[in-house]
Every structure is written in structure tokens, then in C-alpha cells.
Amino acid sequence: MSIGAQRETAQLQVDEEPVLRLRNPLTWVLIALGAAVLLALPWYVYPPVAMDILAWGLFAISVDLLLGYTGLLSFGHAAFWGASAYVTGLIAINTGLPFPIAVLGGAAFAMLIALPTGWLSVRRTGIYFAMVTLAFAQMLYFIVNQWRDVTGGENGLQGIPRSFFGIEAIESDSFYFYYVGLAFIAVGALIAWRVVNSPFGRVLVAIRDNPARARALGYDVDRFKVVAFVISAGLAGLAGGLFAISHGFASLQELDWRTSGKVVLITVLGGIGTLWGGPVGAAIVVTLEDRLATSGFEGIGIITGAIFVFVVLAFRRGVWGTARHLLGRWLSRHRGAPNASPPDPSPSDPSAPDPSPPDPSPSDSSPPDLA
């Protein structure tokens, strides 16, 4: 290899180095900053809107688990978000159980219907996979719309209670409810982080990059995809259930195909394959929609669409992905390229080399990545 090629390879490794490791003090600074923002959010943003940001953020994380780490684009994830919203509402209305139990029941139902859906969908890839998931979502939309005696049909499911072990402050005040919801969202985000930084997650990345090579190494590619699909559906269901409890109703809009499109937009806006880009994109989209709606502006889709096009053209890694990339380059100038570790290529970076499927054994003792 020539000296020029070696320098280019070293530079590529520096650019794609995971910069947020647990052993890096900067990581803990960012974690503390993020926690402070989340804790202070309902003080500066209307609490129901702040809860929407959290719910859509976890929803986007669930999509990124498929799109960014498994290479599967789902246009039917609204099925799990909406199904969980309805089941959560039905459990809360008919049983009077505390809403955490209802939300977990909705998430479990989302995972249950994801199992046959994923088993059939993963047999296709690319646009065919997206169309199959969209077909399942539309089928569920039709069932919910026609089952009026249970779901309320076009009127939706209204009057969902927010019972929480008799604690009136949480049941009646959205401000205090936000912090209980934040705990659920944090657990969901932690599950997603643990999945992508586990041996199972490294196999998913190998399948994303080269499924034929992963299959040649003995991995059951379809089985791994189905498991990832079900986990993703469970996270989407957790977010959808909290969304329904927060608003006190569940409507057909939660199952609409435009909901699936919106969460894909949020994921791309934040950054595909970054995991934490989803909450960033959700904060931008939800806050923008709320401000525009409050001002009386009716062309919200025009503004959000224009911002999406701008971000895609100007920041090909997304907002969070670009920020992480710039931070990595800045740190590399201070540490020097010789100390750079092997790259962790993102699916949004076409210049990254095609790695061999990683060793999924838990023998890797290096701290996991946070970004």
C-alpha cells in the first residue's frame, strides 16, 4: 500500500471512530447535559408537548434499530404504535389498572402481532419489505376502523384514564406525569442501546452490511431479522401506549400510513444508524409543528418538508450524525491519528469500507459506544 493510501485509510478511521465511549470523560459530560435537558424540558415546554417529544423520540429509536442497524426500512411501524395505543386504552378503561400495566400490555401486544408480520416480511428486502409492512399496517387500520363496538371506529377510543396507584398529582397533572413517562422512555432507550452494543447487535450490523457473508458464517439471517423486528415493535408499542395515556385517547391517526412516514422522516432527520438521532429529530419536528399550529399556520407539511430536504442535502448524516462526526474530527486533531481505533462505519456513509461480519462473542471487553 502506498503512503498516500495509508494516510487516506488512517484519516477514514479517524473520521469514523466512535467518539463517545464510557471511558471518555466527554461522554459523561454529554450524558449529564442530556439528563439536565430532559429533566428541565417540561419547565420550558408545555408538558404534553414535552411528552410527545419523548414518545416520538423512542418511536424513532425503534425505527432506527431496524433501518440503521439491520438495514430494513419499514413503512408500517404505525401498526405497532397505534395497536399499542388502542390496547393500552382498552386495558385502562375496562380494568382500571394503573397505566404502567396498561402500557406494558400494549407493548406486549405490539410484539405479539409483530412476530407473524416480521416472519413474513423479512423474506423480502428493500422496497418489497417496506411494501409488505405497509400492507400489514393498512390491514390493521381497516380492522380497527370497522370494529366500532370495541375501538370506536372513526371517533377513536376516548376517555382513557391515567390511573397511577391513587397518586392524584400524576393522574391529574401533565407536569408530574411527564417524569413518570420519562422513566419508561429511558428504560426503552436503554434497551435499544444495549441491543445495538451487544454481540447480537454486532451480528445485525454484519447482516446489514453483507447478509450473504453473514449467512456463510453460519448465522440464521432471517431469524436475527425477526428478533430485531419484534424488539423494534415492542419499543414502538411502549412509545405508542405512553402517547395514548398522555393524550387520553387513541385515534385512527395513530395507525395511518402518514404516521409511519413521519417517524421515518424524524429518524432520517436526526441521523440513520446513530440511535440518539431519533430524539433529536423528534424534538425538532414536534416543537416546530406545535409552534406553527399555535401561530395558526396551516401549511405545516410544507415547512417540515422543506427542512427535511435541506437537512438531507446539507447534512447527509443527519443532525446528530453530523454533530458526532464533527466532534470526532475535532477530537482527532487533538489526539492525533496514530491513536485512532478501528472504524465503526455508519450505513449513511458510502465511503466507509465493507467490514467483515464482526465476532459476536462477548469476549470484547472494550466499553460499548454511546453514539
Image: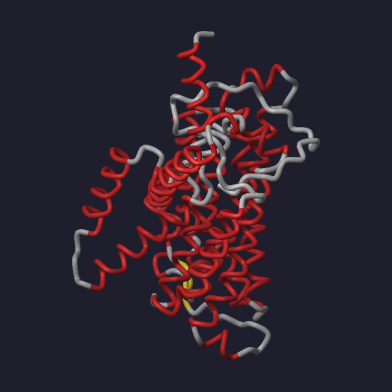
In the image, taking residue 223 as reference, residue 205 lies left or right, namely: left
Q: What residue lies at 49% left-to-right and 32% top-to-bottom?
A: 347
Q: Position of residue 250 (x, y in %)?
A: 47, 68
Residue 152 shows in the view: no
Q: What residue lies at 51% left-to-right and 44% top-to-bottom?
A: 274
In the image, taking residue 50 as reference, residue 20 lies left or right, namely: right
Front position in the image: 30 or 103: 30
In the image, taking residue 255 as reference, residue 30 lies left or right, namely: right
Residue 329 shows in the view: yes
Q: Is 49 above or below relative to 173?
A: above
Q: Is 220 above or below relative to 130?
A: above
Counting the numbered discs, the total is: 0
Q: Is 202 above or below relative to 301?
A: above
Front position in the image: 278 or 252: 278
Q: What residue lies at 51% left-to-right and 21% top-to-bottom?
A: 9
Q: Residue furthest right?
A: 363
Q: What residue lies at 55% left-to-right and 21% top-to-bottom?
A: 354
Asked which quadrant contains residue 106, the reply is bottom right
Q: Position of residue 300 (x, y in %)?
A: 24, 59
Q: Is 348 above or below relative to 268?
A: above
Q: Position of residue 367 (x, y in %)?
A: 70, 45
Identify the image quadrant of the N terminus: top right
